[in-house]
């Protein structure tokens, strides 16, 4: 007869033992089958996405050469943006409405709402619209189209194989990872980005293995090089303890820069809602504004802006102190008025130039802190601190990558419960002092509400701040 534990005394039931576990071969037979299945599917997704990304990058390079050839001498292609943006709007509205915007956002929404089902027409239309935007100087990136092209290809692949909704969803996530890994030449952080970007603070480990396979295969097939040159300055003579403190301070500032971008996107989107019935007029106005803006600020903020990113990281050439702010303006206007493309490359630009600017003001090594910003703004704006931290370690010298990862983690916290991806779902509260509704899209958070948690330190501080004016008024 089993003896009941005494009240107030620990339970005397023995802990579980290895000998009591089930037979290993039943479990491992299923695991071996699953591993083989997702090795094949992940590799197939990587092959499809790698070749698709390669075709996209070739078209991008060819279009840039063609535009320069047909543009009359002395005239910048950016002056044709008032025609290029309406053409993008027409292509997307006519043939693939889900291809609108910066690509990854639409894929996240499809994964959460449609089990990853994406029309196959999205791939060619997204490719064409993004090439058109970038060729004439729109400020967008190239990872969003690659993610959406990869997702569309893998969704079609799932249709051909007649996969169920769960397997289709996993395969489409592999498409995001493969697209990011292929276009930036970062297989590990690319795989993690595809998993991490779906939720704020939650990772689906069931998709980790196939995403790693997809990212590595897509990277090998595409052959793109990593976007970051070697840093000539090293640690700039700074001590380890100094770097820890500076990483946290700079990470907080990068979080605020990311917040500025998000709020600018949100504000312009809200302001343009009254003109939703006139998308072509909005596109013409956006293209006209950008052409005039580039004439004032310079063509360095048009297109991908890779030379400026490299100058900031290598601490060569002159990078304007407000370069990050001008890039925010160009990116927000391009995306919100009809342009098609990604947003991660602009995040690299904004991060690297803001880091360089802050370092110049404080007389610190510019290349070092440009590298911190390179990954920090991505971590904050996309809520992908692990992918950004791994990217820092993957791309930068070891001594730099570790501290860049710390800056990325700090930026992730300071940006709050906001993201450039409105369909990203909330998986946790970033502060123990806040009650945040979980499992809803970030874009709905303002409607759902956010409250200070009762009994938390935040509530006590808030009460103290609210009492001070009352006490002063009583004394007066």
Image (tube, rainbow, N blue to C red):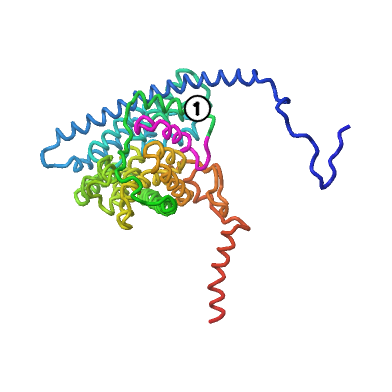
For the residue labelled by badge 1, is the local secondary structure a helix, a strand or a loop?
Answer: helix
Find the residue positioned furthest to the right: 1
- Residue extending farthest to the bottom is 476
Q: Position of residue 57 (x, y in %)?
A: 29, 29
Q: Residue at x 63, y 58 (%)?
A: 455
Res 458 → quadrant: bottom right
Residue located 33% across and 37% down the image = 341
Q: Is residue 188 magenta?
A: yes
User: Residue 348: x, y in percent?
Assistant: 34, 43
Q: Position of residue 457 (x, y in %)?
A: 58, 59
Where 45 falls versus 414 (above or below)? above
Categorize mark 1 by other alpha carbons within 10 Å: few (<14), some (14-19), many (20+). Answer: some
Nearer to me, 112 or 344: 344
The residue lying at 28 percent from left, 54 percent from top is: 321
Of residues 231 and 440, the one nearer the viewer is 231
The N terminus: image quadrant:
top right
Question: Residue 167: x, y in percent?
Answer: 51, 24
Q: Viewer-proximal residue, 140 or 373?
A: 373
Q: Is residue 368 magenta?
A: no
Is 16 positioned to the left or the right of 429 in the image?
Answer: right
Q: Is residue 459 visible?
A: yes
The quadrant holding residue 340 is top left
Magenta region, main secondary structure: helix
The tally of labels here is: 1
| Residue 270 in view, yes or no | no
User: Residue most toward the left?
Assistant: 73
Residue beneath label 1, please? Answer: 209
Magenta region: which residues? 180-203
Nearest to the observer: residue 150 or residue 312 = 312
């Amino acid at each position: 007869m089993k003896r009941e534990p005494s009240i107030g005394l620990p339970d005397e039931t023995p802990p579980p033992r290895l000998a009591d576990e089930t037979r290993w071969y039943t479990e491992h037979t299923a695991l071996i089958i699953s591993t083989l299945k997702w090795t094949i599917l992940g590799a197939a997704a990587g092959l499809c996405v790698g070749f698709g990304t390669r075709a996209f990058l070739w078209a991008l390079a060819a279009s840039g050469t063609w535009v320069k050839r047909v543009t009359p001498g002395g005239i910048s292609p950016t002056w044709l943006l008032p025609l290029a943006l309406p053409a993008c709007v027409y292509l997307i509205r006519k043939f693939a409405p889900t291809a609108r915007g910066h690509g990854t956002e639409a894929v996240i929404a499809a994964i959460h709402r449609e089990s990853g089902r994406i029309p196959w027409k999205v791939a060619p239309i997204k490719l064409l619209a993004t090439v058109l935007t970038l060729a004439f100087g729109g400020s967008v990136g190239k990872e969003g189209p690659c993610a959406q092209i990869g997702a569309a290809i893998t969704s079609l692949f799932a249709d051909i194989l007649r996969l169920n909704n769960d397997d289709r969803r996993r395969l489409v996530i592999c498409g995001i990872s493969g697209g990011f890994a292929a276009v930036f030449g970062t297989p590990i952080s690319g795989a993690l980005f595809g998993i991490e970007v779906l939720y704020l603070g939650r990772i689906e480990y069931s998709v980790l293995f196939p995403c790693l396979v997809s990212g590595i295969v897509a990277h090998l097939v595409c052959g793109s090089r990593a976007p970051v040159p070697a840093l000539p300055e090293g640690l700039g003579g700074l001590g380890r303890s100094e770097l820890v403190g500076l990483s946290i301070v700079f990470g907080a500032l990068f979080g605020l820069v990311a917040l500025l971008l998000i709020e600018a996107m949100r504000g312009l989107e809200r302001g343009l809602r009254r003109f939703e019935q006139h998308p072509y007029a909005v596109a013409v106005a956006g293209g006209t504004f950008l052409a005039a803006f580039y004439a004032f600020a310079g063509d360095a903020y048009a297109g991908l802006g890779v030379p400026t990113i490299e100058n900031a990281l290598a601490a060569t050439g002159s990078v304007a102190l407000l370069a990050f702010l001008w890039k925010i303006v160009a990116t927000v206007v391009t995306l919100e008025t009809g342009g098609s493309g990604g947003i991660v490359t602009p995040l690299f630009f904004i991060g690297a130039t803001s880091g360089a600017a802050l370092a110049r003001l404080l007389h610190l090594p510019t290349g070092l802190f440009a590298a911190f910003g390179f990954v920090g703004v991505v971590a904050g704006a996309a809520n992908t601190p692990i992918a950004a931290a791994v990217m820092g370690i993957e791309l930068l010298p070891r001594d730099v990558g570790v501290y860049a990862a710390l800056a990325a983690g700090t930026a992730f916290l300071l940006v709050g419960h906001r993201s450039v991806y409105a369909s990203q779902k909330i998986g946790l509260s970033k502060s123990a002092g806040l009650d945040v509704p979980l499992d809803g899209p970030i874009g709905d958070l303002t409607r759902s509400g956010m409250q200070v948690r009762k009994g938390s330190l935040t509530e006590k501080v808030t009460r103290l701040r609210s009492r001070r004016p009352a006490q002063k008024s009583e004394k007066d």
